[in-house]
Image (cartoon, coloured by chain):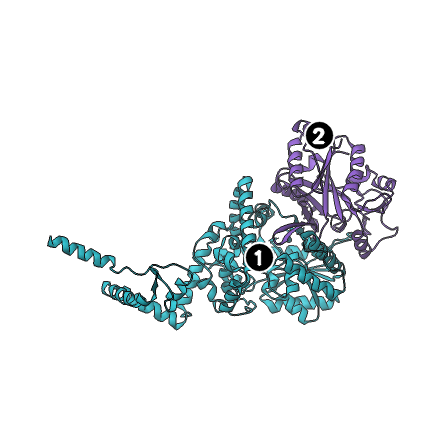
Chain colours: A cyan, B purple
Amino acid sequence: MPGELPPAAASWPERRRHALADPAMRAAVAKSTRSLTAKKEAVFAAYPAAEAMRTRAVIARRGSLARVDALLDELTCQVEARGGHVVRAAGPADVGHYVLDVARRRGVQRVVKSKSMATEEIALNEQLENAGLHVRETDLGEYIIQLAGERPAHILVPASHKTRQQVRALFDREAAACAVDPPAGDATPELTAFARRQLRADFLAADMGISGGNFLVAETGTLVLITNEGNGRMTTSLPRVHVAVVGIDKIVATWADLADLLQQPALSGTGQRLSTYTTFITGPRRDGELDGPEEFHLVLLDNGRHELLGTEFADVLACIRCGACLNVCPVFRTIGGQAYGSMYSGPIGVVLTPLLGGLERAPELPKSACALCYACADACPMEIDLPRHILALRRTEVERGMEPWTDRLTFELWGRFWASPAGFRFTGRIARLGQRVYVRDGRLKGAPGLVGGWTATRNAPPLAREPFHEWWSRRRASRAGS
Amino acid sequence: MVVAAACFEGRVVTRKPSAGSLAEVSGRGALVAEFVESWRGLEGDAWIVRGGRDEVRRTIVEAARIMVEDGGPGAHRRVLAWATADLAALELSGLIAEQGWEHVAWPSGPGGATGAIGPEGPAAASAAPTAAGADPTPADLVALAAASDLGITTCAWAVAETGTIALYATPATGRLPSLLPTAHLALVRPSQVVKSVPDGLRLLADYMAREGGPPSAVNLVSGPSRSADIEGDLAVGVHGPRRAGVIIGEW
């Protein structure tokens, strides 16, 4: 079954214009992406074991994905044997219904969440809020984004496009709304202290914690959760009920597989050897334990993933959401994450958004949000061939006739003329005549249509008065004559 | 002996001991040194103790004074500690009371304790006094932990190259003491330090083989809570303990 993603907030030209007109955001994104890339390179250089582990991790990940159905069955048995509940969800509505059902049964009013791309994908917060639940994002970046009423701009650092002044303004507004003291200033410790105080209160009052999951270990039914802030631990330790919403692609067969994978999100994402908190959760609180959730629910989300198995795109399921491809992408570095109109931005978003949500959901991404520079292919620790997938999606768009008629006509005419030497020469003669009014100071300026867009920010030389093939013919003729 | 402590940019670090002195700590000197270096690299506090039980006790007090803020003379501090057999020899309750602070022992649960998890597996819990007399409810414990200044635990194993400690959740070794107090202090024996994360996971695999599966929760902790969500600037202590300390020694 194909999946479903929430629609983009605005059209592609609007999102693009908006992004390009925001110098503060662009500077923040440029800074954070370059810094994360430098940290990643530094950790791999200083930690020789990392590369060998990464290579084994790729094999482990693909091996597990090749038998995902059997592993999901094994996982389900293991979780249930330890007192947890497992449910398979085809799409957003299934998850919403299930979580709301649990919430009603357990009298849940307040929900805390730790960062999860899977729940972004299914707009779970909206579904819960519409049903009257209070939902609080607890990752610092997600908290900022939630207060701003936006969507995350980066898989790993969702608020990387916000400046500290903007963060302070959001916190001041929240402080006024809650009638509490605002942050003492806009220095990082002051902003952090405000968030800590506010979020601590939310954690202590919450009835349900919703987390995602970085990996699932089939052989013991274990959920692996990786965070740096500790909000994942809070979310899964304090509330009475813990619900984990995890894509079926996160499964690995054994702990031996996990051993090679566990450090990869940190190594490639933030350049740490291991994230600060790694939590292995196997079922709910056990007999005699005085902390931990009373109930553990694991929602296995499909949302278009299963359909990708066995296709040329299957390797995208190996993605560990480290964000390394975003950080090296020249397009992402220029326009930031929100312009993609999807929770998955950057090169992986260009591929994953149409694959999960349908090509009609975001035809502009493969077509316009990639320069085919292949930096992402080099950066991906799971060796996902993102540029090849982007080309394949472009081809599919053309095969389905999805491009506008103007594009089709342009390329058809272009192809027809340039298919013969006579046609090629003819277009050259026309262009040389036509360019005369647009040549200023020896440069092409302000020509109409596509040429104008190209020359607006570039110095394009005009076509030569005498093209090579004419010069060549003349030279041969004069030699023959001499 | 506590390696001399020095203040550095608001963080207490201890001078890097020579390899020779560490070799005396145990045969795992190099691993211990690497662990301490990694842990400090993550903004964590570390003390290496060579003198046995009494030095470990003295260092716990020193660490508590340094890691817990607002510690003027006579200030009330609450210390929430696991009360496992492994920790019994340290007599934490007396030690903490001597400082004029409140000691709360993590209760081993109504179902009866199965105890601390060391490399040798679950051990019997000690008969150390527990919180607030009769069976505290989980909600009481959350409130108590959230209002504690320091949590003291041991660990199951530690990883040298990542600066990581592993905490297994069992009735006697609850999750909250390492999570909610303002600071967390873990006692690590030199023999518990392994080289890599996969080495540590092999110890977990041994536990699983013995116990028929993993604990309900295992937490790998690598330094204090951190975030880079505001302009990529490092912020320590967003959610979890603001300071995370380790004492490496035998007791």
Instruction: Give the x, y percent position of residue B145.
Output: 79, 51
| Chain of the residue that carries numbered disc 1 in the rendered image | A
- Could you say whether the residue bearing mark 2 is in a helix, strand or loop? helix
Instruction: Give the x, y percent position of residue B62.
Output: 79, 38
Do we see residue B240 in this rendering?
yes
Question: Number of marks in the image?
Answer: 2
Find the distance from the CA under tag 2 to the CA under tag 1. Answer: 44 Å
**Which residue is situated farthest in the front direction here?**
A441
> With respect to residue A468, does A57 lie above or below?
above
**Which residue is situated farthest in the left direction here?**
A482
Q: Are marks 2 and 1 on the same chain?
A: no
Do we see residue A142 in this rendering?
no
- In which quarter of the view is residue A23 placed? bottom right
Identify the residue position indicated by label 2 in the image.
B25
Instruction: Give the x, y percent position of residue A239.
Output: 74, 59
Identify the residue position indicated by label 1 in the image.
A155
**Amino acid type of the residue tagged 1 in the rendering:** Ile
| Chain of the residue that carries numbered disc 2 in the rendered image | B
Question: Which numbered circle lies on residue A105?
Answer: none
Instruction: Give the x, y percent position of residue A398.
Output: 40, 67
Camera-side residue of A379 and A303? A379
In this rendering, which labeled residue sits more in front, label 2 or label 1?
1
**Amino acid type of the residue tagged 2 in the rendering:** Val
**Which residue is situated farthest in the bottom direction here?**
A405
Camera-side residue of A34 and B183? A34
Taking B102 as reference, is A114 left or right? left
What residue do we see at 71% from left, 46% from top?
A: B168
Crowd band around label 2 with a 10 angstrom C-alpha radius: few (<14), some (14–19), many (20+)? many
Taking A413 as reference, is B224 left or right? right
- Given contact means CB atoms under 8 Å apart, are the residues at marks 2 and 1 in contact? no
- Could you say whether the residue bearing mark 1 is in a helix, strand or loop? loop
Crowd band around label 1 with a 10 angstrom C-alpha radius: few (<14), some (14–19), many (20+)? many
